[in-house]
């Protein structure tokens, strides 16, 4: 189409990054009639990744330029943390990104006017500058997290010693203070390389011409105000902040193929009677915790769908490998990790799905009434926009912050007394949390009482629908990039 504006989005490796970037791209295409090209580091080892890529291009207005992740084996330690690996891959990948962007700038029918990178891609902002394109950073999480990223270099100067050893919460201007136990993964150990990498991309964010964040004005008004206030965080971040959320996936027919049996099973259940259990694109847990979770689900007496992965001690062990052919194990094989007799005792009460579930289809089904979630922001938004309350089970990245936001500020989730990555959450507590969000109590006249958590999530769902109907702030980004 002549004169159609063209933008390029850059995704760092990992489905948890690619999925929101694609959603952002779709919003530009369907709501603003843009031509979108996504540059993505893809490994082609995962069925889920192949499906996600295929459906992204099916709309016709979105092209994907795939770049193989650079070989970083000679540059970093094989045990390096996920954040270190991501940052090094993106840095080493800059020449390939430059090639891809230059080619697009030279050959595309309409020259791209802007580059939007995710938080791991800030080193590529310089390439956009070289090519005289506008440049933006997309934070696929919420405004409190963005505030922390912007304020991290200041905290680095203010705080002595390890963050986790501090007694008092960290004050981030205009935001809820952040408890030491809720800091993001790269802040856990200041001596680890990932901390320097983290400070590197935190310093990179203000270099963009603007920041897009996956939240909406009424959800995080105070955080957004402080990010924009010249005397508070706006003093560090001079570029405008656009609340473009909630960006959530809609079900897609491609991903839903082969799950007719699951839909059929859900169709046969009572309304809001099934809890969905999943730990995102990369979450895993220890064998002991998996056993307790199985017992907890059984003891809760609730129906469930559980996306199951082989147990492993590191919480983010599947980040680069989820659904990869090497790790695919069918549900029957995975049941060897579960308590003896679990599968037969929960036959027809619970369903086990191996590795990767059609999450969006599941969460929007009327029979689903709860989500035991690792609190990745995409998952949290998918739950909220379907009016589904959560059990918050944070594992890594910024998930502890997300859990605190969901439980304490928004009141849409309950959480265990201990952090699931530090101690094992026992079966009784799991059963009790599941029942708290799922069971509808009756008063002495047998009238059903309202579940306050469910009521709150439905109210926030309505505010999300309203934000979507107003179109969010993408129109401003489009207008500034013409
Ligand atoms: N997802 C899915 N099926 C799964 C696990 C995850 O479809 O079995 C999707 C989920 O719907 C979400 C994304 O993967 O869109 C995960 O993103 P999130 O921010 O929740 O967590 P992350 O994976 O980044 O930790």
Image (spheres, rainbow, N blue to C red):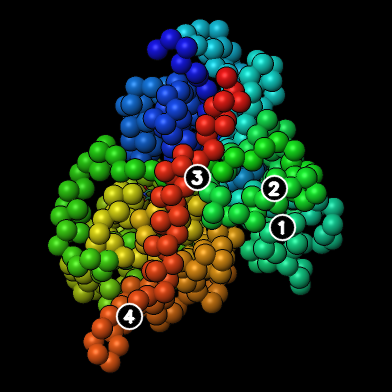
Horizontal and vertical percent for residue 152? Answer: 74, 50
Could you say whether the residue bearing mark 3 is in a helix, strand or loop? loop
Label 2 or label 1, whichever comes before in sequence order: 1
Question: What distance separates the C-alpha of mark 4 from that of mark 3?
Answer: 32 Å
**Which residue is denoted by mark 1 in the rendering?**
174
172 or 74: nearer the viewer: 172
Tell me the number on the disc at residue 227.
2
Could you say whether the residue bearing mark 1 is in a helix, strand or loop? loop
202 or 345: nearer the viewer: 202
Label 2 or label 4, whichever comes before in sequence order: 2
Question: What distance separates the C-alpha of mark 1 from that of mark 3?
Answer: 20 Å
Question: What distance separates the C-alpha of mark 2 from that of mark 1?
Answer: 8 Å
**Which residue is denoted by mark 4 in the rendering?**
449
* Figure quadrant of the N terminus: top left
Location of residue 139 (image quadrant): top right
Label 2 or label 3, whichever comes before in sequence order: 2
* Figure quadrant of the C terminus: top right
Tell me the number on the disc at residue 245.
3
Label 4 or label 1, whichever comes before in sequence order: 1
């Amino acid at each position: 189409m002549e004169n159609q504006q063209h933008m390029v989005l850059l995704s760092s490796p990992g489905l948890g990054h690619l999925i929101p970037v694609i959603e952002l791209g779709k919003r530009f295409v369907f709501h603003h009639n843009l031509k979108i090209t996504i540059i993505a580091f893809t490994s082609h080892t995962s069925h889920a990744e192949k499906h996600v890529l295929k459906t992204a291009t099916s709309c016709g207005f979105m092209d994907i330029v795939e770049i193989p992740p650079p070989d970083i084996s000679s540059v970093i330690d094989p045990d390096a943390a996920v954040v270190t690996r991501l940052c090094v891959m993106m840095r080493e990948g800059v020449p390939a990104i430059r090639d891809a962007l230059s080619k697009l700038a030279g050959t595309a029918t309409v020259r791209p006017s802007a580059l939007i990178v995710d938080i791991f891609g800030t080193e590529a902002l310089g390439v956009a500058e070289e090519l005289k394109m506008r440049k933006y950073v997309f934070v696929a999480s919420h405004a409190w997290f963005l505030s922390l990223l912007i304020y991290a270099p200041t905290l680095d100067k203010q705080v002595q010693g390890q963050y986790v050893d501090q007694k008092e919460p960290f004050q981030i201007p205009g935001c809820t203070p952040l408890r030491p136990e809720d800091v993001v993964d790269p802040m856990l150990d200041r001596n680890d390389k990932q901390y320097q990498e983290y400070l590197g991309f935190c310093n990179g964010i203000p270099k963009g011409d603007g920041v897009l964040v996956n939240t909406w004005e009424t959800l995080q008004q105070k955080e957004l105000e402080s990010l924009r206030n010249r005397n508070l965080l706006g003093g560090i971040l001079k570029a405008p902040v656009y609340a473009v959320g909630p960006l959530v996936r809609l079900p897609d027919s491609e991903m839903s193929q082969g799950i007719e049996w699951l839909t059929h099973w859900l169709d046969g259940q009572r309304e809001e009677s099934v809890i969905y259990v999943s730990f995102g694109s990369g979450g895993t847990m220890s064998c002991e915790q998996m056993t307790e979770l199985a017992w907890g689900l059984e003891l809760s007496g609730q129906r469930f769908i559980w996306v199951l992965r082989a147990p492993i001690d590191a919480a983010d062990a599947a980040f680069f490998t989820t659904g990869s052919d090497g790790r695919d194990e069918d549900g029957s094989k995975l049941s060897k990790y579960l308590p003896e007799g679990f599968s037969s005792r929960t036959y027809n009460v619970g369903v086990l799905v191996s590795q990767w579930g059609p999450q969006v289809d599941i969460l929007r089904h009327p029979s689903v009434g709860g989500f035991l979630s690792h609190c990745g922001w995409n998952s949290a938004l998918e739950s909220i926009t379907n009016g589904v309350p959560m059990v918050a089970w944070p594992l890594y990245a910024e998930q502890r912050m997300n859990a605190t936001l969901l439980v304490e500020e928004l009141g849409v989730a309950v959480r265990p007394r201990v952090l699931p990555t530090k101690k094992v959450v026992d079966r009784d507590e799991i059963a009790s949390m599941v029942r708290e969000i799922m069971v509808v109590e009756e008063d002495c006249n047998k009238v059903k009482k309202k579940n306050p958590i469910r009521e709150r999530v439905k109210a926030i769902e309505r505010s999300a629908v309203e934000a979507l109907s107003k179109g969010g702030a993408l129109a401003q980004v489009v207008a500034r990039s013409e």
